[in-house]
Image (cartoon, rainbow, N blue to C red):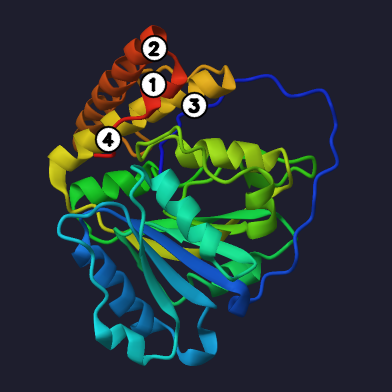
Amino acid sequence: MTLISRLVFFKDEQKTEKKSSERITKNEISIVIPVKDNQKGIDNYLTKFFETHSKANFPKEIIIVDNNSSPAIELKSEYLNFGLPIELILCRKIGPASARNKGAKIAKGKWLLFNDSDCIPTKSIIRGYLKADNNSVAYAGNIKSLDNDKLSKYYESQEILIPLKTYDENGDFVPQYLITANSLIWKKAFNAIGGFNEQIAIAGGEDVDLGLRLSENGNLSYAFDSVAIHDFSDGILGFYKRFKRYGEGNRIVEELWKTDLKPTLFRPNERNFVNEILAKFQYIGLRIGYRKADKIVRKYGLQQSTVVKNK
């Protein structure tokens, strides 16, 4: 998942015919969740999923991809008693891009629903996509904050996990890219572009790059009625680490797409004293991460700069 404040690059003048997907059906959706060191998150996700979904509303399967957790992620036997196939697999290659690709490779469904391990599903997480179905190749779902503290309110008011809006030729809002905390992708289109770029071994930039490549293949749409709840309880240190990582991801996407994603000062969407302070702190995190990645990109190039530990 990645925050992008803006994307600036020229439009390709070559008009390529965009593909249309198959219709979305719930029993053709494979949920893929990468996880590293978050047993609690996986337990919360599965517990809430079975609280909010009856057997009639089950997807095809849930695939959990353990990306070198220590201790290893475990799948409690109680979750196997609901009649929904759940598979826990291991991905040794570092990074959520690699973990998601491994999960997608074994997925049996025609659609891939990517969620993060710090997300909690709601009863609308699948049906929201069914409602939004318009033959797009991918859909950006909605994210709400779990708690009501000042940090959580800031994340939500800034739409940190909602892709930037742009307009299509009909004047409708469409996402410029995807954020894989909650997104649904047609597997045929996913495979056609080669999945996630595994050079990007951090949790930042990999989903934006994927969404931009998908948008060259077919249309992207919002599915605001598909809601996942995000747990932002990692406090101010987690806030700083998150935006530092996003700053690194921005620099990588900038290099890949020859655009301008250098962090700039900004005012928060909801202006109050706390949000003004948090916006400055967000900028500092983005700036430090961007500069860190920039030094490595300039010295070694893209491949070396992106193969780093996923923190």
Residue in the picture at 34% in, 92% down? 81
Q: Amino acid at mark 3?
A: Val
Question: Alpha-carbon distance for marks 1 and 4?
Answer: 12 Å
Label pair 2/1, CB-CB below 8 angstroms: yes
Q: From the viewer's perspective, is 59 left or right of 2?
A: right
Residue for badge 3: 253
Location of residue 229 with respect to 178 vertically, above or below: below
Residue 234 visible, this orientation: yes
Q: Amino acid at mark 2?
A: Tyr
> On residue 300, which mark appears?
2
Question: Alpha-carbon distance for marks 2 and 1?
Answer: 6 Å
User: How crowded is the residue under tag 2: few (<14 C-alpha within 10 Å), some, or many (20+)?
Assistant: few
Q: Which dot, 3 or 2, sits closer to the camera?
A: 2
Residue for badge 1: 304
Task: Report x, y in % for residue 267.
Answer: 35, 27
Tell me which numbered mark, 4 or 3, is placed earlier along the sequence: 3
What secondary structure is found at the residue carrying circle 2?
Answer: helix
Instruction: Name the foreground residue: 264 vs 237.
Output: 237
Residue in the picture at 34% in, 39% down? 270
Tell me which numbered mark, 3 or 2, is placed earlier along the sequence: 3
Instruction: Name the foreground residue: 188 vs 128.
Output: 188
Label pair 3/2, CB-CB below 8 angstroms: no
Residue for badge 4: 309
Determine which quarter of the picture holds residue 282: top left
Residue in the picture at 26% in, 57% down? 231
Question: Alpha-carbon distance for marks 2 and 4?
Answer: 16 Å
User: How crowded is the residue under tag 3: few (<14 C-alpha within 10 Å), some, or many (20+)?
Assistant: many
Q: From the viewer's perspective, is 221 left or right of 94?
A: right
Tell me which numbered mark, 1 or 4, is placed earlier along the sequence: 1
